[in-house]
Amino acid sequence: MENNTENKGFDCFKAELSEKDFQAFSRYIFTEYGIKMPPVKRIMLQGRLLKRIRELKMNSYSEYKEYFFSKEGQERELLNFLNVVTTNKTDFYREPVHFGFLKDHVLPAFAESTGFNRPFKVWSAGSSSGEEGYTIAIALNEFKLSNPRFRYEILGTDISSQMLQTAARGVYKESKIDMVPLELKRRYFLKSKDRDNPTVRVIPELQSNLKLRYLNLMDSVYDISETFDVIFCRNVLIYFDRITQEKVINRLCRHLSSDGYFFIGHSESLSGMDVPLEHVKPTIFKHR
Ligand SMILES: C[S@@+](CC[C@H](N)C(=O)[O-])C[C@H]1O[C@@H](n2cnc3c(N)ncnc32)[C@H](O)[C@@H]1O
C-alpha cells in the first residue's frame, strides 16, 4: 500500500491523522479542488502529509491542520499541500489512440477547413509534469514537417506547481521515453552527458509551443480567452464525483471550438451526462 513506502524511515514519528482531522482535509480538498477523498484514503493522506510535517518540523497532524487552515497557512502552505495531495501519474504516449486520431482525422480536417490561416490550439487540462503536452507537441510537429505553414499552440494547466515546474523544465529520466519511437526520440530529445543519471531534455522548439499555467478546474469561470480545437482532459475527471465531472466538462466545452474534439482517459466515461459532446469512438468526443 502506498503509505507503507511513503512512511519508511520515519519510524520515530508515531502520530496518526485522526478521523476528525482527515475529514477536515478531505472536505476541503473536495470542495476546493473537486478531488474525492473517501475514508479509505485516510492512511494514504496521512503518508503524504507526513512529508510536509517533517519539512516544517512539526510534531503532529493536528498542529499541521491548525497551521494549514490559518490565514498564514492558506497563504504559505497551500501550494505545498497541493503538491503532496495530487496524484500526478502520467507518461509520454499514454493512451496513444488519441495521437493517431489527431494525425489521421483532426489535422487533415483542420488543414482543409482553415487552409492554415490560423494556429491550431490544444489544451492539456490536468497536464501534470508535461509528458502529455510534449507528446501532443511531437504529434503536431510531425504534421508540420509535411505542412510547413501549419502553426500550433498548446496550453498545459494544473494545480500542482511542482508538476508545472517539471513540465517547464522539460527534463526527464531517459527511461521515461522508452515508449517513444526511436526516430522521434532522436528528433525531439537531447541526451544528457551524465551516464550515471541519464536524462533527456525536450528540444527548445517543443518547449516554446507549450505554455503552462496554474488553473483549478473547479473555478466557476476559467480565465482563458482562447478557443481550442482539441481539449485533452485525461485521467483527471476520475478523481471527481459525477456532478463535478459534468460541471467541469460543461465549463471546458465553453472553450472548445464548434467543431472541436474532446479526449478523456480510458477509465473515464461521459455516459448519461448532460454535456454538449457527441460520441465518436471510445474516449473521443466531438462538440455539438
Ligand atoms: C493523473 S494526472 C493526469 C495527467 C495527464 N492528463 C495524463 O493523462 O497522463 C492528473 C492531474 O490532474 C491534476 N488535477 C487534479 N485536480 C485538479 C483540478 N481541480 N484542477 C486542475 N488540475 C487538477 C493533478 O494535479 C494531476 O497532475
Image (cartoon, helix red, strand yellow):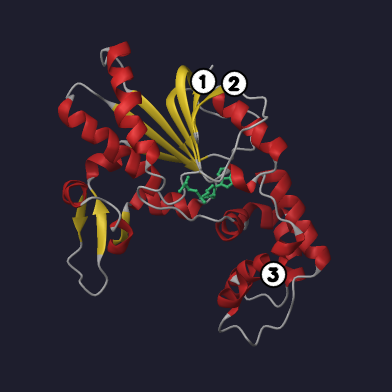
Q: Amino acid at mark 1?
A: His
Residue 84 position (above or below residue 276): below
User: Ligand 1 within 8 A of label 1's CB?
Assistant: no
Quarter the N terminus occupies = bottom right
Q: Earlier in the sequence, mark 1 or mark 3?
A: 3
Residue 7 position (above or below residue 19): below
Quarter the C terminus occupies = top right
Q: Amino acid at mark 2?
A: Pro
Give the distance between the C-alpha atoms of the residues marked 1 and 3, in whole angstroms: 40 Å
The residue lying at 19 percent from left, 52 percent from top is 182
The tally of labels here is: 3
| Circle 1 SS class | strand
Q: Residues within 10 Å of mark 1 (few under 14, many from 20)?
A: some
In the current view of this chain or complex, which residue is farthest to the front? 281
Q: Is residue 56 visible?
A: no
- The nearer-to-camera label among 1 and 3 is 1
- The part of the image, by quadrant, that contains residue 45 is bottom right
User: Ligand 1 within 8 A of label 3's CB?
Assistant: no
Q: Are marks 2 and 1 in contact (CB under 8 Å)?
A: yes
x then y, percent, for residue 229: 41, 23
Q: Amino acid at mark 3?
A: Ile
Q: Which mark is residue 276?
A: 2
Give the distance between the C-alpha atoms of the residues marked 2 and 1, in whole angstroms: 6 Å
Q: Is residue 185 visible?
A: yes
- The part of the image, by quadrant, that contains residue 275 is top right
The residue lying at 79 percent from left, 59 percent from top is 23
Q: Is residue 249 left or right of residue 95?
A: right
Q: Which mark is residue 287?
A: 1
Q: Which mark is residue 153?
A: none
Q: Which mark is residue 43?
A: 3
- The nearer-to-camera label among 2 and 3 is 2
Residue closest to the eye, 28 or 145: 145
